[in-house]
Every structure is written in structure tokens, then in C-alpha cells.
Image (cartoon, coloured by chain):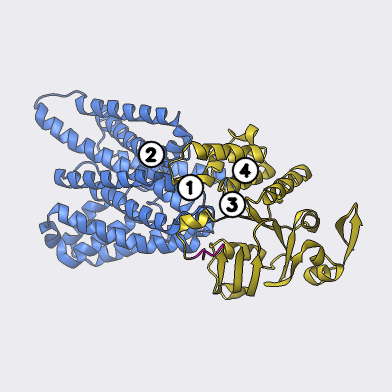
Amino acid sequence: MAERRLLWLGLALLALCGAFLAWQLRAPMGFILGLRAAKLGALVCVGAATGAATILFQTVAGNRLLTPGLVGFDALFVLLQTLLVAALGGVGVAMIPASVRFGVELVALAAASALLFGLLLRRDARDVTRMILTGIILGVLLRGLAEMVQRMMDPSDYAVVQQAMFASFGRVDPQQLAVAAVVLLAALAAALRMAPALDVAGLGRETARGLGLNHDRVVMVSLLLMAAMVSVSTALVGPITFLGLLTASLARQVTGTHRHAVLIPASAIIGALILVAGQFVFERLLGSQSALAVIVELFGGLLFLVLVLKRRRR
Amino acid sequence: MIEVSSLSYSAGSTPILHDISTTLERGGITALIGPNGAGKSTLLHCISGLEKPASGSVRIDGHDPFAVPHRQRARLVALLQQSPALVSRLKVRELVSFGRWPHHQGRPCPEDEAMVDRALTAFALTDLAGRTIDTLSGGQRQRAFIAMTYAQDTPWMLLDEPLNALDPRHARDLMARLHALSRDGSRSIVIVLHDINAAAGWADHIVAMKDGRIVAQDASASVLTEATLRDVFDTPFELLHHKGRPVVVAR
């Protein structure tokens, strides 16, 4: 039943991607197709990475309101990039090949997030309210730190950072996209391999440990995979805070299961669906260029409010 | 056999358990009784390897629960915890199936399914198997978690206040079920009870705790005296006998 719905989601995504590529295709076909394919690739990668990362994070945090974006996972990425530019200078960073730079950023983010969020999850895991607050404050702190470094840096260096900071699907470097896709696929495969362990982790730390799950290790591995996925999406287009909340909630609604073997791919596909469909509607049908990120944030933010209010009523 | 020797545990800087040494023999039901905050739950957590004691050691059938691999530990001892977290969209059958995780690690075989069926039958959950946990009443939920602990199929079952939220019928059914299990030799049961009469009626041994120490430990009849109970609970009790069974009444 849940698997069937997953199949339908996959087919819907394929159909949508076809439409995205073929809609009103004119000469020069090869050139336009190339442009569209790069954009489509970025949209799918970002949507899938955000969707899968959010499910992982919600499971290890034991909370359906948190997303990696909300607790500052992507802010951490922006901070790292800012520090990199501040240390090497805009020219220095530009001279590093995209794949090397991406690799360095990935490792740094994985290490930093494992440290930061590992501590956060271990200390506050029992107190959900405190964990949400700590997480959000941590996000604000990281954003503030990044901003402070940006204010102190050279204006031309700042321009390099600024480019990375705002969600935009307009410009995507094909080489970066290829690296991102490989990293994302590896992270997704690893996440799916540990899906049964994540199901157990979803029962809560105490019960999971009682069942003999090495809960701390599952949390650490999940954080590393999440770091990889968030790097993929943030490096490609910049931070989108609420997309994850939207996709994870929809994935749970649509599949009606707790099993990660279904939830993770479903959330990834829905993330890609939202972005591709949104971009298609805005760019092709409404002729507007950059409104997608804003609209996704708007609906995600509204959903967050609805979820918070619903929870309070219970 | 569970051997606890000079075990001490502190939560932060607050000492909870002081130098506890005891031996629990295999077979039968051992009840832990004592006032709130006596350290009963903490002792169960330490024994099952979930809370590391500050000092002292635990041996379950000769194994150190903190040294054996997590999976082996979970096949040796199962702990029913108080108020476990709830997962939405989780069906009763799926929850009980998680009890098999230490055995199959994500790849269930027909024996696992058979054990889940037995657990559902044993705790009168067959009719509820398709319901999601968050639609159940407190007592039904409690039974579902007990069934999960049972499905773990360990020689030792540690149950932290399993009678919570159970109506008299299901409380009696549960105690009778545990009694039967402990009699056929397959399970040894350690159970935290607040109802002293449940302990009086069903337990073979009683361990009475107070302020993080064991005050008395013996066969049920020896521990259930007016003097011991008054010492443990700081309140007077009267011990009656009804049809050959001890009945404890608070005065």
C-alpha cells in the first residue's frame, strides 16, 4: 500500500521532469535542453536532499517540527563558506576547483555538525521543548556569526559569499552538480541501508536502547549523512528553511507509514516534485524568474504554524 | 541469576542508589516494592544495562550487560519502561514486531512473525493488532508495550510498573500470565509494583527498597510483615489473611 503510493510518486516525478524538459521546446534545441537539464538536475537534487535529510533529522531528534534548516544546519554551511572566503580571499576560493572546494566544505560541515548537533541531541533529547528552543537559538547564533564575519570582510570577497547565500536556481555549475549528485546518491543509499535501524530509533532513545540498538551510533551516522545532504542542497542553491518541513509532513501524510524504507524515498521524491512543479509553474506559466524560493518558504512557514498550533490543542 | 554487587548510581550530583548488593535467582517473580523515589526504576535500568552505575557491577547469568554487545544484551534482558515515547501511525502489530529486532536486525523470518502472533494472543491484543498506537486507551497501550517486551523473548523480563493504567481484569490477567510464564521455567520476572497486594498475591520473592537502599529481601511471606512495611513506607499497615492469602490494608 505504502510502496504503491511511493511508486506513484516516482512516476509523477518522472512525468513532471519530462514536461519540464519538453515544454515549448524551440530551436536551438540542444542548447536549451542542456540549460534546462542542468536546472532540472539542481531542482531534483536539492528537493531530494532536503526531503531525505529532514526525515533523518526528525527521527533522530524525535520531533516532527524540527528541520535541519530550522536548527541552523545550513547556517553552519554558510558560516563555513564565509570563513573559507575570509581566510583565503575571494580570488583564492575561486581558484580552487569546484569539486575540491565542495569536498572540503562537506568534510568540514560533517565534522562541525556531528560535534554541535551530536552534543545538542545527547543533552537535550529528553526535553523536546528545550531542544527546539536550543536548536532555533543555535541557528540564529550561527547566522549571526556568519553575518558578523561578512561585515568585516572585503566588499569583493563579500560578493562571492553573497552569491552562495540566497536560494536561487538560476545559476548552476554543471561540474558542481555532478559532484553533488554523486554525494547525494551515496548518502541516500547509506540512509536506505540503515532504514530498519532508523525505524527502531524512531521509538525513542530509551526504547531503542532497550531493544539493543546502538542509538548513539545511529544518531552520529544520521548526522553525517544529513550533513552531506544539506551540503548538497546549500552548495547548489543556498539555504531554504522550510522546504524540509513541507516535504517531510507531506511524505508522512501520503504514505501513512513510519517505515523509513518508504518515508525517506517518499520525502525525497516529494521534495523534488515541489521544486520542479513550482519552478515549472512560475517560470513557464507565469513568466516569473525567482519567486519559487519565496513561495516555498511562505507555504512551509504557514505549515509550521499550523503544526505548532495543532500540537498545542492536543 | 542476576548478581548486583556494591552498585551505586548518581543522577548528576544527586545520589540515587547507595551500595546495593543483591542476588536474584532464576525462575519465579521477584517484586520490587518501596515508596516513590526509592530507586526501583533506576535499579532496573542499571540491571538492564541502560544506565551506567557510578560504581559496582551487574552480572546477568554471568554476563556483564555493559560489556556484551548491545544486541546480545537485548536478547538476555528486556525492560518495559514507564511511559515510553509514542510514535504516530505505528500499528499495534508493528510495535510488537519491534520486540523481535534483537533477533532479526531488520530481516524478520517466519519464526519472528509466529512469536509476534503469540505475544498478541497472550496479551489479548489480536483484535487491536491493526489499530494505531495513538488511538488506544492508556491500558491498551500499556499492554501493547508489554507484548513487545514479551516478544523480545529474553530469559529475564524486567517490568517497571506494568500495572499502571490497567483495569482490574487486565491487571489480574497480566499477573496470571506472568505467573504462568515464570512457572514453566522459560522466563524470570522482576517487576516493580505499587500495589502491595499484587505483590502479596503473585510474587515469590519481594525486595523492599527505601532511599536507594535495599531494606528487606526474602520470600514474600517473610517480607510482608507489619513492622517491615511500616519501616519501608513510613506508614502503618495491617496484615490480614483471607482464604490463606495475605492482604495488606493501610491503617
Q: Nearer the viewer, residue A290 or A142?
A: A142
Residue that carries the numbered disc 3 in the rendered image:
B84
Which chain is yellow in the picture? B
- Amino acid type at image mark 3: Pro
Residue depicted at 80% across the width and 57% down the height: B200
Give the mark, 1 or 4, whose residue is nearer the N terminus: 1
Q: Please tell me whether mark 2 or mark 4 is closer to you in this view.
A: 4
- Chain A shade in the render: blue
Q: Chain of mark 2?
A: A
Distance Cα–Cα, label 1 vs label 2:
29 Å
Place of residue A68 in the rendered image (x, y in percent of width and height, measured from the top left): 38, 52
- Amino acid type at image mark 4: Ala
Give the mark, 3 or 4, whose residue is nearer the N terminus: 3
Asked whether the residues under marks 2 and 4 belong to the same chain, the reply is no
Distance Cα–Cα, label 1 vs label 4:
19 Å
The numbered disc on residue B103 is 1
Place of residue B141 in the rendered image (x, y in percent of width and height, measured from the top left): 64, 44
Residue that carries the numbered disc 2 in the rendered image:
A267
- Amino acid type at image mark 2: Ser
Give the mark, 1 or 3, whose residue is nearer the N terminus: 3
Q: Please tell me whether mark 3 or mark 4 is closer to you in this view.
A: 4
Distance Cα–Cα, label 2 vs label 4:
29 Å
